[in-house]
Image: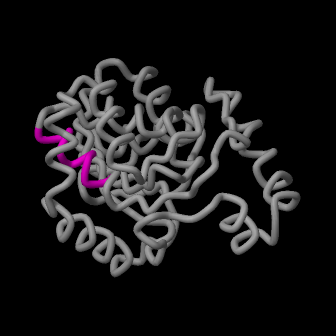
């Protein structure tokens, strides 16, 4: 079963959605899932150097206090899937283009999922700047890749156009919020749904699109 996951690595609901999908797949161990991570930038106009976190929250939510109220529900949902969100550690909101490039680089080495997990952890739990090339190279090493080679690759323009084209393609398809899970390039599930929500979709895919009696 092929699953395309359209997400951004600074989207907390994408991290939660990843965990919930994993739990759903664990309920169906007979299913073999082939996952492709697809890029989406929550902030496509973000400066390359990113933004100070407080300035970003002020622009997006009107300030830290309002953001804290919104993130309270995210923390609660995260706790149910063993994600200890630490929003207070984040000092910079990054441009995520290079993080998405790194995921594509890792995919070519068969390490996309560990890379995505490492990026989520680095940003949401450790508060690291995942827009910085040096930090991204370190995270690549933590995900099982050669950090020096990954760092050198990031300094090139490789995959920049591909990432931006995929982002634009998702928007043309009407995707304007993530995560979005697309099964067998045909059945779409939007949002960080509970694990049980995915099970009928798995059944639909297994039965060739025929409803399960």
Residue at image position (32%, 29%) is 114
Image quadrant in which you'd find residue 207:
top left
Image quadrant in which you'd find residue 70:
bottom right
Tell me: residue 74, above or below residue 64: above
Residue 131 vs residue 124, the one in the foreground:
131
Residue at image position (24%, 27%) is 32
Q: Main secondary structure of the magenta part?
A: helix
Give the residue furthest to the bottom: 172
Residue 35 vs residue 162, the one in the foreground:
162
Tell me: residue 32, above or below residue 137: above
Residue 106 drawn in magenta:
yes
Residue 1 vs residue 133, the one in the foreground:
133
Residue 129 x %, y %: 49, 47
Residue 46 drawn in magenta:
no
Q: Which residues are magenta?
A: 100-108
Q: Is residue 85 left or right of residue 127?
A: right
Residue 96 x %, y %: 41, 58
Residue 184 x %, y %: 24, 51
Residue at image position (23%, 73%) is 165
Q: Is residue 166 left or right of residue 29?
A: left
Residue 136 x %, y %: 34, 42
Residue 210 in sight from this viewpoint: no
| Quarter placement of the N terminus | top left
Tell me: residue 25, above or below residue 99: above
Residue at image position (23%, 31%) is 147
How is the structure coloured here?
one colour
């Amino acid at each position: 079963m092929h699953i395309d996951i359209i997400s951004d690595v600074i989207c907390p609901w994408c991290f939660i959605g990843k965990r919930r999908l994993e739990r759903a797949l664990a309920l169906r161990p007979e299913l073999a899932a082939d996952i492709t991570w697809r890029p989406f930038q929550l902030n496509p106009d973000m400066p390359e150097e990113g933004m100070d976190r407080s300035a970003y929250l002020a622009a997006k939510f009107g300030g830290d206090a309002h953001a804290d109220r919104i993130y309270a529900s995210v923390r609660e949902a995260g706790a149910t899937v063993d994600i200890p969100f630490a929003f207070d550690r984040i000092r910079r909101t990054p441009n995520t283009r290079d993080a998405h490039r790194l995921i594509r680089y890792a995919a070519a080495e068969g390490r996309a999922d560990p890379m995505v997990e490492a990026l989520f952890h680095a940003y949401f739990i450790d508060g690291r700047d995942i827009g910085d090339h040096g930090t991204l190279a370190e995270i690549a090493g933590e995900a099982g890749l050669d950090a020096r080679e990954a760092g050198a690759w990031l300094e090139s323009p490789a995959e920049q156009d591909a990432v931006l084209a995929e982002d634009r393609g998702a928007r043309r398809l009407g995707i304007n919020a993530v995560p979005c899970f697309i099964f067998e390039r045909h059945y779409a599930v939007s949002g960080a749904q509970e694990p049980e929500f995915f099970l009928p979709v798995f059944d639909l895919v297994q039965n060739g699109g025929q409803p399960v009696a």
